[in-house]
Image (cartoon, rainbow, N blue to C red):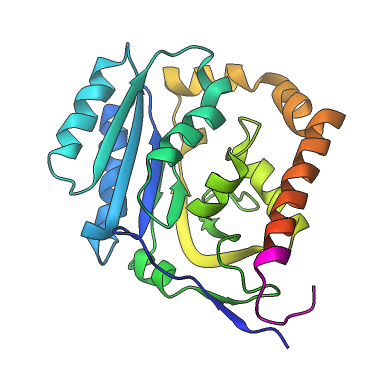
Amino acid sequence: MTQPLTFPVTSPTLVSIILPSRGRPAELIESVNSILYTAVNKDKIEFLFRADNDDLATIDACHCLMEKLPHAQLWVSPRDKGYLEMHRWTYTLAKLAQSDWLLLWNDDAHMVTPQWDHLLLHAGVASWHNVPDIYMLVCKSKNRLGCNEFMFLRKKMVDYLGHISLSPHSDNWLMRVFTAIQSVTFLPIEVDHFSQDMNDKTREESVAAYANGKLAQETLESPQAQQAIRNDAQKLLSYILSHNTSGVSL
């Protein structure tokens, strides 16, 4: 019989919000406020922002937010390849995180569920391996059925792999890896994602970057990408096997 999995909290903050942003200062502030308004323990949330060095409005918005946030950092860097660098940006921010949990977030998303951080703090699942370092908890998208875009990751897992994903489509990459090792559970936490409702320049750039699904074909569907996904899954499975002290048969 499997034992219930609980997630220890050993860090000064519960969760670090990984939040790259571009060209949406007002929306960024609204997005951050939605996380804070619905949280129980606001002082246990860390925000890690990333902005392009030519995006002064976003940089200013981040500084305004940081004046009121107990735990926050801002990383400013050149645009380079834009959205094609997203997975690298999120990993750079993740390395700065102080929390046990990381939440990959967007500036066009709003947290909907009240007391979401309480639900995360007390999350528990019927685990097959009892190794809390290697697990992913997925939120529900309120207005985009079938999309699994927002996920909590254990920071130790990210440190162990040395990346979040090897594709700008990090959510798809992670779902494939964690499904393969049966280490993913859906939380009763809802997120509104307004990406398709925002017809601004940032949206145009994003659509252009992912045009025609070519990027997914190259970084998710190619034989090289499929092998890299299997490599991540195998590495995490090896970690589970070496750290499983519960006596559960794998």
Q: Quadrant of the N terminus?
A: bottom right
Q: Can residue 149 be seen at all in this image of the molecule? A: no
How many numbered callouts? 0
Rendered location of residue 173, percent (x, y): 68, 42
Instruction: Place residue 122 in its image quadrant.
Output: bottom left
Rendered location of residue 151, percent (x, y): 53, 52
Q: Is residue 171 above or below residue 112?
A: above
Give the residue displayed 62% in from the left and 49% down from the top.
147
The region drawn magenta spans: 241-250
Q: Main secondary structure of the magenta part?
A: loop
Q: Is residue 40 above or below residue 70?
A: below
> Is residue 74 shown left or right of residue 153?
left
Q: Can residue 130 be seen at all in this image of the molecule? A: yes
Rendered location of residue 209, percent (x, y): 60, 18
> Is residue 250 shown left or right of residue 148?
right
Rendered location of residue 135, percent (x, y): 59, 61
Give the residue displayed 44% in from the left and 41% down from the top.
94
Spot the residue most to the left: 67
Q: Quadrant of the C terminus?
A: bottom right
Task: Decide which of 5, 199 is in the foreground and name it.
Answer: 5
Give the residue displayed 65% in from the left and 52% down from the top.
146
Residue 249 among magenta residues: yes
Give the residue displayed 45% in from the left and 51% down from the top.
102
> Is residue 68 shown left or right of residue 155?
left
Spot the residue most to the right: 223
Task: Decide which of 74, 248 is in the foreground and name it.
Answer: 248
Instruction: Place residue 50 in its image quadrant.
Output: top left
